[in-house]
Image (spheres, rainbow, N blue to C red):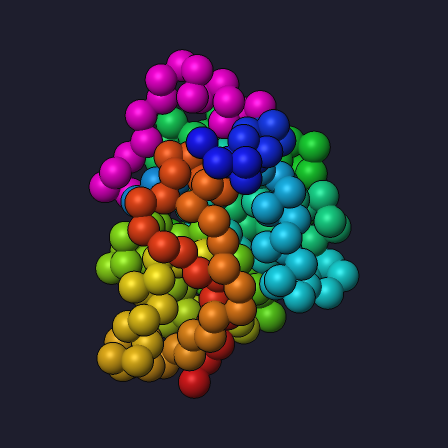
Amino acid sequence: MDSAATALLAVESSVVADLRARGFQTRVDFGQHFLRSPEVATQLLALAGLHGGDAVLEVGAGLGTLSATVAQAGHRIWAIEKDPRMAEVLCTSLGPYRDRARPIMADVREVNLDDELPVGTVFLSILPFEWTLAFGIAAHVFASTSKVARGLAVVPTVTADHTAAGAWFGAGLRVEEVDGISRHDFWPEATVPLRVVSITRC
C-alpha cells in the first residue's frame, strides 16, 4: 500500500471502518462505492462553489459522508439513497441537521423532484462507478426538473469522455472536468479512473 493510501486510512470515517470490519458487501449492480474520508467531502464541497444556504441534491447518499458535510456547512441537503440497508446509518449521519437535512430512501426516478426541491438547487453527487448508470442518473435529474441549476459530480473517466461523442450533449448537458480524485478515496477502491466534473445545461 502506498503512503497516500496509508494516510487516508488514518482519517477514514469510523462508519466505513466498521463496515469493512463486518465484511459488508457493496451492491455492484448499483455501482456502489463509499467515500472514505470526510476531508475529501470537504474538498468536493469547496469545488461546488456553494453560497450560504444553497439547496443541494445528492443522489446515492450512501453513508451520508458528503451529505453531512453539506449540512454542517449550513446548506440544505436532500439526500436520496436507493439501498434500504443504508437507511439507519444515513439517518444517523444527518440526525444532527434535521432542520436542513432531508434523507429520502427511494430510487430517484420515483421521487417528484419538482415538489421536493427549491429553485436553484445544486446537484452534488458521487455517481456510480459504471458509466451508463452515472450518465442515466445525471440525465434523469436534469430532465425531470428545472429546479436543479447546475451540478458537480464524481464520475468514471469514461463517462466524461462520452461528452466528446455527444452523449451528454444529447441530454442537454455540458460536462467540464474541474479536478481529479483518487481511487483510494473510496471503499471499495475504484477499479476505474475517476474525474470530478461540473455539469451545466447547454
Q: In this orientation, which residue lies closer to the viewer: 41 or 106? A: 41
Farthest-out residue, top: 22
Taking the spot 36% from the left edge, 44% from the top edge, the residue there is 190
Whether residue 74 is situated above or below residue 12 in the rendered picture: below
* Left or right of 136, for residue 86: right
Taking the spot 25% from the left edge, 79% from the top edge, the residue there is 165
Write the start and end of the magenta stretch as one range.
14-30
Farthest-out residue, front: 2
Q: Is residue 87 magenta?
A: no
Q: Position of residue 12 (x, y in %)?
A: 57, 30
For the N terminus, give its image quadrant: top left
Q: Position of residue 62 (x, y in %)?
A: 45, 38
Residue 30 seen in this snapshot: yes
Q: Position of residue 37 (x, y in %)?
A: 57, 37
Q: In this orientation, which residue lies closer to the viewer: 65 or 107? A: 65
* Left or right of 64, for residue 101: right
